[in-house]
């Protein structure tokens, strides 16, 4: 609008003179160069250390390095090492203005360090923004993340996505509480039941760094024993970290720590807390307000100050294996922390994994066990029912419960609840030949047959009904349930014991506790609720289905799940009885009867050493389309002692079915090759795989290839 316009011209009134003067002043001021946020064009740089080294959050291997950016003077105070920043990434050399690179998309990152000069000879882009002045990435956490990335052939950015929780501005604004003084050293308590238990606590309380593999006695005392180990570490003025498989287990350790130490001395890091509360707890740990942490898998990266103890409970649980790249295992991450921080290490379980047995076998850790007399006093009586017993037992064919199990349930219900463990959830059972146990398959598509409510056979894949099935292996016509789900088992037991309440615990609804009253509790493995006072008896059904899985760890995993359920049963002196339906001569069943998981793990370790299987050797899995796998293997400069097994086809993923970890996308045919190296060459193998994968990504050629170090499922 011109200043000559007056009130005429249609009666419109012009702006007042003050507004026109303001507009003119703004136009004049526009000619002066200004620093614009996120580009900072024309802005002066910081006088001290004007270069920021930044890790961009790209998560691709060929960009797994640091990039230099200029620090504007306005951001000098907030741009400190460890803070979150935003930078422009992807601008070419030709997009330079006034000696500064511009363009590119905004991306998050972490400021690693400030420098006086840059190694890059060209113009630098400026930091776009300091997201928060809160330093969240310290030197110890950065060193750990780099070690994990190198071990698993992954990128540092991917590891930091697992290690640093998402930001919550409201949580950052709240001040963390003042740290409490160190508590007194606890007494031994139930650790006195173990041969070297009191000495282990004394070493923690005196500032030592003992390393132990703990075979816990059955019963609920394990959470209190972990709490005493944490308290002994805090008494020495150091921090402690405990990683457990799930939220229910974390809640038990949390309650034990609260009883022993009171509130305010530890943080609980689980997904159930919500992002804001969890981030506030994480900040309290990072700021040094809290020195002890209990949490699930993501807590393995918790930035505990002056770390004195790392502990993991039930390291064989699948929940400890991260499914996001680079897929680290919590046990291995804590082993790295124990080595980097030179702190104490404790792996505990009712059972014993082969990896834990190897730690003892190599001398890196000491066993922490109880004497056989103590084990017999605390463990329940374990009885077995094999195929021969089932064949002679009319009750087993009529009601799915052998006579021995029927008697154990009836006697147990007189004094308390009875636990029934089944291998899977759901209702519809899969079927197999009653004579040779060959799986019942559809004649049209070879899919598994299921028994519907009306008794008709139907294919799970194509939905066709089968009216004249016979076994192609032995010619038999009789079928038996291969695996019966939890709901079907609960229904059958409800009819067998009509006056007793039946409760189920599984994926849809997991019970935490059950009262000390007669009841039947049907549960899938890992979802067993804790009974007040312990279960009077437990039935472990369909054991052969757990042992028959085509996996290297099937026996170890079955024993771990059985012992996890049997440990909730009362001791034998109080009438506790466990009945396992499995062949008595099998090694895992014998280990359960003797309550000797350590002996089983030692024998498994010896056999794997003869065969060259993990954990004695290091192994990597390479999967993808046949052409991509062949091209990748040809490009990898493996160590001279590497051995390639395969490739072999992977089972396809059916449309509409959940995709298992490591399985191909629906409709694609993948192959998998295993690369095995002896001890000492694992780092070289990981580096070679990472280099080949980074070169492949940089070229952008071919189909994607999935690389996983030490996969838990190798068949």
Image (cartoon, rainbow, N blue to C red):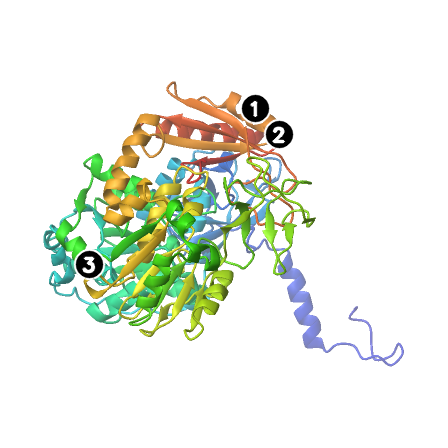
Q: Which of marks 2 and 1 is nearer the N terminus?
A: 1
Frontmost of labels 2 and 3 is 3
Q: Which mark is residue 441?
A: none
Label 1: how many Cα within 10 Å (few below 14, some 14–19, many 20+): some
Secondary structure at numbered mark 1:
helix
Tell me whether the residue at label 2 lies in contact with that at label 3, contact meaning CB atoms closer than 8 angstroms.
no
| Residue in the picture at 65% in, 51% down | 458
| Residue in the picture at 53% in, 59% down | 426
User: What residue is shown with label 2?
Assistant: 702
Tell me where residue 282 sits by quadrant. Answer: bottom left
Q: Nearer the viewer, residue 442 or 129?
A: 442
Horizontal side of 517 relative to 451 (left or right) equals left
Q: Earlier in the sequence, mark 1 or mark 3?
A: 3
Q: Which of marks 2 and 3 is nearer the N terminus?
A: 3
Secondary structure at numbered mark 3:
helix
Tell me whether the residue at label 2 lies in contact with that at label 1, contact meaning CB atoms closer than 8 angstroms.
yes
User: What residue is shown with label 1?
Assistant: 631
Horizontal side of 499 relative to 193 (left or right) equals right
- Please state, as top left, top right, bottom left or bottom right, where the N terminus lies in the image: bottom right
Q: Nearer the viewer, residue 218 or 363?
A: 218
Q: Nearer the viewer, residue 626 or 171?
A: 626
User: What residue is shown with label 3?
Assistant: 378
- Please state, as top left, top right, bottom left or bottom right, where the C terminus lies in the image: top left
| Residue in the picture at 11% in, 58% down | 192
Q: In this view, does 423 lie above or below 712?
A: below
Q: Which residue lies furthest to the right in this view?
A: 10
Label 3: how many Cα within 10 Å (few below 14, some 14–19, many 20+): some
Gap in angstroms between the C-alphas marked 2 and 1: 9 Å
Tell me where residue 241 sits by quadrant. Answer: bottom left
Gap in angstroms between the C-alphas marked 1 and 3: 56 Å
Q: Is residue 247 above or below residue 361?
A: below
């Amino acid at each position: 609008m011109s200043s000559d316009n007056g009130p005429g011209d249609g009666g419109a009134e012009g702006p007042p003179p003050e507004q026109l003067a303001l507009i003119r002043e703004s136009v004049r001021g526009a000619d002066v160069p200004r620093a614009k946020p996120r580009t900072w064009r024309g802005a002066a740089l910081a006088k001290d250390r004007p270069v920021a080294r930044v890790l961009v959050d790209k998560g691709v291997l060929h960009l797994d390095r640091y990039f230099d950016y200029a620090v504007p003077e306005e951001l000098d105070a907030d741009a400190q090492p460890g803070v979150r920043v935003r930078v422009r990434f992807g601008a070419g050399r030709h997009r330079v203005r006034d000696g500064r690179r511009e363009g590119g998309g905004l991306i998050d990152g972490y400021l690693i360090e400030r420098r006086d000069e840059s190694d890059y000879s060209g113009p630098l882009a400026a930091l776009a923004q300091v997201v928060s002045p809160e330093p969240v990435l310290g030197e110890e956490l950065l060193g750990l993340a780099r070690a994990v990335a190198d071990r698993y052939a992954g990128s540092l950015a991917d590891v930091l996505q697992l290690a640093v929780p998402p930001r919550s501005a409201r949580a950052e604004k709240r001040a963390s509480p003042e740290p409490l003084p160190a508590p007194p050293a606890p007494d031994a308590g139930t650790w006195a039941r173990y041969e070297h238990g009191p000495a282990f606590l004394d070493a923690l309380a005196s500032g030592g760094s003992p390393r132990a593999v703990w075979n816990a006695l059955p019963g609920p005392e394990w959470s209190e024993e972990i709490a005493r180990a944490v308290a002994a570490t805090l008494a020495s003025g150091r921090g402690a970290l405990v990683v457990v498989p799930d939220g229910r287990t974390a809640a038990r350790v949390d309650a034990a720590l609260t009883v022993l130490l009171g509130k305010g001395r530890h943080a609980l890091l689980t997904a159930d807390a919500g992002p804001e509360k969890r981030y506030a707890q994480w900040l309290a740990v990072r700021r040094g307000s809290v020195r002890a942490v209990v949490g699930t898998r993501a807590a393995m990266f918790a930035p505990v100050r002056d770390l004195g103890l790392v502990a993991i409970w039930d390291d064989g649980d699948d929940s400890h294996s991260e499914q996001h790249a680079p897929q680290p295992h919590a046990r291995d991450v804590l082993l790295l922390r124990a080595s980097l921080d030179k702190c104490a290490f404790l792996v505990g379980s009712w059972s014993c994994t082969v990896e834990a047995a190897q730690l003892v076998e190599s001398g890196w850790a000491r066993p922490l066990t109880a004497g056989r007399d103590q084990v017999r006093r605390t463990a329940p009586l374990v009885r077995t029912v094999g195929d021969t017993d089932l064949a002679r037992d009319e009750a087993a064919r009529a009601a799915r419960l052998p006579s021995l199990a029927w008697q154990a349930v009836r006697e147990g219900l007189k004094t308390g609840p009875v636990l029934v463990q089944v291998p899977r959830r759901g209702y519809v059972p899969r079927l197999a030949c009653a004579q040779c146990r060959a799986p019942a398959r559809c004649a049209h598509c070879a899919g598994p047959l299921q028994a519907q409510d009306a008794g008709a056979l139907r294919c799970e894949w194509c939905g066709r009904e089968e009216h004249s099935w016979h076994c192609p292996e032995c010619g038999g016509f009789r079928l038996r349930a291969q695996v019966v789900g939890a709901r079907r088992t609960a229904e059958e037991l409800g009819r067998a014991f009509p006056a007793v309440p039946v409760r189920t615990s599984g994926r849809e609804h997991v019970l935490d506790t059950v009262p000390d009253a007669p009841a039947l509790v049907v549960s899938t493995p890992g979802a067993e609720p804790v009974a007040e006072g312990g279960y009077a008896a437990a039935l472990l059904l369909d054991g052969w289905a757990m042992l028959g899985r085509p996996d290297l760890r099937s026996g170890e995993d079955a024993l771990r799940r059985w012992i996890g359920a049997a440990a909730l049963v009362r001791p034998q002196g109080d009438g506790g009885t466990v009945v396992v339906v499995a062949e008595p001569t099998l090694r895992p069943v014998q280990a359960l009867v003797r309550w000797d998981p350590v002996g089983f793990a030692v024998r498994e370790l010896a056999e794997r050493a003869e065969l060259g299987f993990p954990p004695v050797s290091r192994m990597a899995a390479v999967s993808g389309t046949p052409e991509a796998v062949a091209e990748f293997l040809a490009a990898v400069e493996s160590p001279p002692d590497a051995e390639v097994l395969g490739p072999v086809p992977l089972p396809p993923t059916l449309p509409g079915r959940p995709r298992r970890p490591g399985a191909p996308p629906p409709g694609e045919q993948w192959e998998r090759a295993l690369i095995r190296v002896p001890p000492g060459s694992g780092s070289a193998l990981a580096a070679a795989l990472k280099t080949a994968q980074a070169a492949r990504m940089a070229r952008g050629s071919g189909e994607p290839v999935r690389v996983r170090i030490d996969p838990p499922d190798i068949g």
